[in-house]
Image: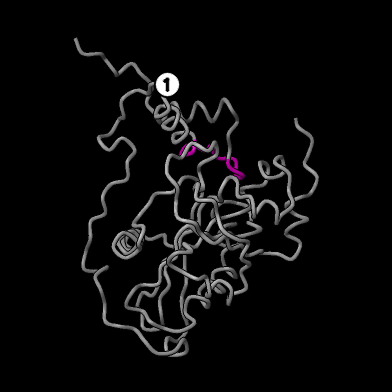
Amino acid sequence: MAADHTAYPTRAALARAVCETLHWLMPDGRLKEMSGYCALRAMENDGLLTLPPPASRGGGRTRPVTFSAASERQAPITGSRADLGPITLRPVTAKDEVALWRELIARWHYLGFRRHVGAQLRYLAWDAQGRVLAAMEFSAAAWKVAPRDRFLRWTPEQRTARLHLLVDQSTFLILPWVRVKFLASSLLGQVVRRLPADWLARYGYTPILIESFVDSHRFSGTSYRAAGWLCLGETTGRGKYDRHHRRTHRLPERYIFVRPLRPDYRAALRAPLPPTP
């Protein structure tokens, strides 16, 4: 007789219970449900536990992106940065823009569309004629990056307590038909100016530093340097979520860039920790 799974709690309910038990909260007080869910999935993959069957057919996997004409290759956009007029860079919130963002990344970014865990903020950039130029995403910072952590001069305890104050530019795409000199550095400067307020409005706190990882075999990072980002060296090829050195294959080495968002960033990230309750 087949087992009756209706008596089992759902995976989502288990993730909520784990977060509540461990007091695993985001800075705005909400439960880190997606992080808890991914932690349970990782433990199941390691053979540490067996989860109940997923409630949906997808089982938490990212659904394939369906492409439309909106993300097809457009007429070339060339000329100078001034020819584009004022550029509008805004967070992606409307349903149609969410779909467009996913399509553009899945179709044109060399890594394709990937779902990130935790806090995240996506942007689309448009020129004065309403033509889409670029797409970006910001998400949770890497757990441990030796050159970055040495640069910030913080202890493991300080990193654990304040890692949420760092965000990772996990995706940056200039659409392939857009060939405008200095556009990338201009967008990097523009997003630095507006990200703190956008992040505060969505998550209730202001980030202090942005990091980004640039494939050193594909790109030189010139636009980041031109926009005032600091290059701290290269990664070891482990990946941002590999906390315990369990990855069985190396990722491409990448340049590590950081951009502080306030002058006293080191002092803010290394301030004395409050006493443990």
Residue 107 visible in the shown view: yes
Q: Position of residue 41 (x, y in %)?
A: 41, 32
Q: Nearer the viewer, residue 48 or 123?
A: 48
Quadrant the N terminus occupies: top left
Question: Is 81 included in the stretch rendered in magenta?
Answer: no
Residue placed at 70% from the left, 53% from the top? 150
Q: Position of residue 40 (x, y in %)?
A: 45, 29
Local SS, label 1: loop
Q: Position of residue 93 (x, y in %)?
A: 41, 59
Crowdedness of circle 1 by 10 Å Cα count: few (<14), some, many (20+)? few
Residue 122 visible in the shown view: no
Residue placed at 32% from the left, 45% from the top? 62
Residue placed at 35% from the left, 55% from the top? 113
Magenta segment, which residues? 26-35
128 left or right of 206 in image: left
The residue lying furthest to the left in this view is: 1
Magenta stretch mostly in which secondary structure? loop
Q: Nearer the viewer, residue 22 or 79?
A: 79
Amino acid identity at mark 1: Leu
Vertical relation: 163 (above or below) 188: above
Label 1 belongs to which residue?
49
Q: Position of residue 18 (x, y in %)?
A: 51, 27
